[in-house]
């Protein structure tokens, strides 16, 4: 009859087991302990700081700033084109467009003269794109045929600035429905004028 009795592990055999259990226990305590900000890795501290204290320069100051419509052009004028931001709000936005054009370059003509030239250029440009009233400037329109007329033309804003050779260049921003039926504002145009017989004449 076999009467084996359980054997008690020797102290030397228990040491590795007790050491492993102690390592597991200490690791669990370390993982569960809250980590202070100073003990966090640099990347973790930076991410936490950015979440808690966002950079004021990257935070929209108002709902309008966060959802504003992108501008279609910069508020600058060059010798070849007048480019201004256009709100796309119809006649209600024309005053803002005019203000931007006025502030884009320093005025260098008397105000009354500038207003006269802008009004004159507006009339001629409407005749250019609609065909109506071209008989007032027969020399200017003598050899130009109107291929297709625009409708609902509106001059949104305009400025006049001096140009070389004692001339004046008028920059216009206008709106209208093109021959394909697309209505759009923010279109740009330029007209060049010279003084002849004490009157301003448009030049091609």
Image (cartoon, rainbow, N blue to C red):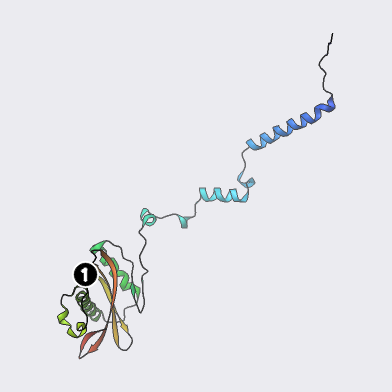
Position of 36 relative to 158 (above/below): above
Residue 164 occupies which quadrant of the picture? bottom left
Screen quadrant of the C terminus: bottom left
- In-front residue for pair 143/161: 143
Screen quadrant of the N terminus: top right
Residue at 28% x, 75% y is 189
- In-front residue for pair 10/66: 10
- In-front residue for pair 107/44: 44
- Where residue 2 appears, x then y in whole percent? 84, 11
- Residue lying at the far top in this picture: please name it: 1
Residue at 31% x, 65% y is 86
Give left or right: position of 35 versus 14: left
Residue at 55% x, 49% y is 47
SS at mark 1 in the image: loop
Residue 74 occupies which quadrant of the picture? bottom left
- Where residue 177 appears, x then y in whole percent? 23, 66
Residue 4 occupies which quadrant of the picture? top right
Residue at 31% x, 72% y is 101
- Residue lying at the far bottom in this picture: please name it: 197
Number of disc labels: 1
Position of 32 relative to 162 (above/below): above
Disc 1 residue crowd, few under 14, some 14–19, many 20+, Cα 10 Å: many
- Where residue 40 appears, x then y in whole percent? 62, 46
Q: Which residue is under mark 1?
A: 150
- Where residue 84 appears, x then y in whole percent? 33, 69
- In-front residue for pair 167/202: 202
């Amino acid at each position: 009859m076999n009467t084996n009795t359980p054997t008690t592990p020797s102290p030397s055999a228990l040491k590795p087991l007790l050491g492993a259990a102690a390592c597991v226990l200490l690791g669990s305590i370390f993982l569960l302990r809250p980590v202070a900000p100073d003990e966090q890795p640099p990347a973790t501290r930076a991410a936490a700081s950015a979440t808690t204290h966002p950079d004021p320069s990257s935070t929209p100051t108002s709902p309008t700033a966060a959802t504003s419509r992108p501008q279609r052009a910069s508020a600058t004028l060059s010798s070849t084109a007048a480019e201004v931001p256009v709100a796309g709000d119809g006649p209600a936005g024309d005053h803002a467009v005019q203000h931007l054009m006025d502030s884009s370059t320093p005025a260098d003509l008397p105000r009354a003269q500038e207003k006269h030239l802008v009004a004159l250029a507006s009339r001629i440009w409407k005749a250019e794109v609609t065909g109506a009233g071209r008989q007032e400037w027969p020399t200017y329109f003598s050899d130009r045929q109107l291929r297709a007329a625009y409708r609902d033309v509106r001059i949104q804003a305009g400025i006049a600035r001096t140009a070389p050779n004692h001339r004046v260049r008028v920059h216009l921003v206008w709106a209208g429905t093109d021959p394909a039926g697309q209505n759009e504002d923010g279109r740009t145009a330029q007209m060049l004028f010279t003084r002849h017989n004490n009157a301003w004449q448009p030049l091609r």
